[in-house]
Image (spheres, helix red, strand yellow):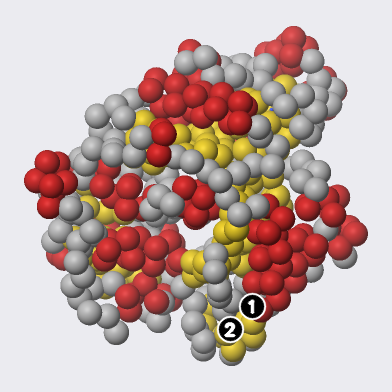
Amino acid sequence: MTSKKTAASISPEEQKEEGKLFRKVLIANRGEIALRVIRACRELGISTVAVYSTADEHSLHVKLADEAVCIGPAQSKLSYLNIASLLSAADITGADAIHPGYGFLSENAEFARLCAECGITFIGPTRSNIESMGEKTRARAIAREAGVPLLPGTVSAVPGKEAAIEEAAKIGYPVILKAAAGGGGRGIHVVYSAQQLESSFDRVSSEAGAAFGNPAMYVEKYCEHPRHVEIQVLCDKYGNRIALGERDCTIQRRHQKMVEEAPSPVLDAQLRETMCDAAIRLCNAVNYENVGTVEFLVDNDTKQFYFMEMNTRIQVEHPVTEMVTGIDLIKEQIKSAAGFRLKIKRSDVRIQSHAIECRVNAEDPDTFAPSPGKITALHTPGGLGVRIDSFVYDQYKVVPFYDSMIGKLIVHAPTRLEAIAKMRQALDEYVIEGIKTNIPFHKKIMASKKFRDADYDTHFLEEFLPKYE
Ligand code: MV4
């Protein structure tokens, strides 16, 4: 299916100056991100090893990689999360680095440690970076020390319910309880009064204990009308760190992002620069390496911004940043892990266009229930500024064991309104038969006045859904 050698895109000077790129990279992931990493490796002249569960035997990443190793049965715990299997696969194929993608083991410090112990480079930040940001209270304390704005709240876990009530009284209601070991949308709970806190604290804390193995909770002032705006950072091993602007990921459903865009329609140049500076200060404080994302809330009412958490991995929505900056984040990530010096300067980053991504899921657009099964017809949109990062093909059977995302549709145009028009055209052209997808839902979002006017907060879908149904 593929020719096994392509010319490396690293110049001979760069090769000489910086030492060696990897010879062979094992991709410890599946789906579209596995393909995305394989493509970047091939452009860099690096051989690739795919790993797959028995359920993914017919997956495109298996066909596209130079080699493929079966690492276990369908269940993630026994395959894509099976560290012994992955390291054995790296060993027998002679891979000198592992790319973890996103999800699975991408933010697992123990996995990063074991890779190092086996003499394999983990393509990501250092173990200490992962640990510092993985514990949300520690991340908050580091951010405060670095002068990164935080919402009022505690920088360590509260010892118990009484302490939580005491802190909440100081902060003022509403407050949000968050699991210290949590992240994303799990282990959080909003309370509007001491009575509510009194009656829910123990339950929320024990839910956190069950979900993350740690019941510790902290308390923050609750921001009622926030937008989710995150800063992409790119760092090398020599202290060079740049921010590549923001992504606005305010359109979410149950803490699952659905639409992402860059730049954010609510930032002006000055706020953007202030937020980028804050993200870099946080990275400097922990000697951050490789790629990462600093998540902020932007209060829609006051336009103040506040640190939420840092993700120490490449993210699903990285393509919108790639489209507006022209920078291949996966290639940069691999070069950084191999010890190459960051060549991109702050003045090289000029963002003068707009990109939007819609996550295409195999799910019922009305109930959001997963819809696995065989794709019986597939037509993908194309044209100038239309990108699809996917792994499915005609007659492919979407398996029920993993995330329901089957692809990302990304458009790129000079302005936001042109990007929306292009996205609507691309969605209209997209044909996926045999399974249900959320494409009809994306069409409704793109057609809505509130989206076009950028007049919404993180509650957009809660308010929008009832009208849609
Ligand atoms: C918040 C918040 C309001 N105030 N923290 C949700 C995911 C997790 N990263 C933190 N989250 C939130 N934290 C304070 N102090 C509102 C959210 C939130 C949210 C944030 C981004 C996108 C969608 C969201 C949906 C509900 C709540």
Q: Position of residue 412 (x, y in %)?
A: 57, 59
Provide residue 105's location: percent of width, then percent of height.
39, 50
- The residue labelled by disc 1 is 430
Q: Quadrant of the N terminus?
A: bottom left
Q: Residues within 10 Å of mark 1 (few under 14, many from 20)?
A: some
Q: Which mark is residue 287?
A: none
Q: Earlier in the sequence, mark 1 or mark 2?
A: 2
Depicted 230 relative to depicted 414: above or below: above
As measured in the structure, the alpha-carbon distance from the residue carrying label 1 to the one carrying label 2 is 6 Å
Q: Is residue 430 left or right of residue 116?
A: right
Q: Residue 346: x and y, percent?
A: 41, 33
Kindly indicate the quadrant of the structure image that contains residue 92.
bottom left
Residue marked by disc 2: 379
Tell me: residue 439, above or below residue 160. below
The answer to whether residue 1 of the structure is visible from this angle is yes
* Mark 1 in CB contact with mark 2 (< 8 angstroms): yes
The residue positioned 54% from the left and 69% from the top of the image is 384
Q: Is mark 2 within 8 Å of ligand 1?
A: no
Residue at (79%, 15%) from the top-left corner?
A: 172
Q: Position of residue 28 (x, y in %)?
A: 33, 59
Q: Nearer the viewer, residue 101 or 207?
A: 101
Q: Residue at x 59, y 90 (%)?
A: 376
Answer above or below: position of 54 versus 82.
below
What is the three-letter code of the residue carrying label 2? Answer: His
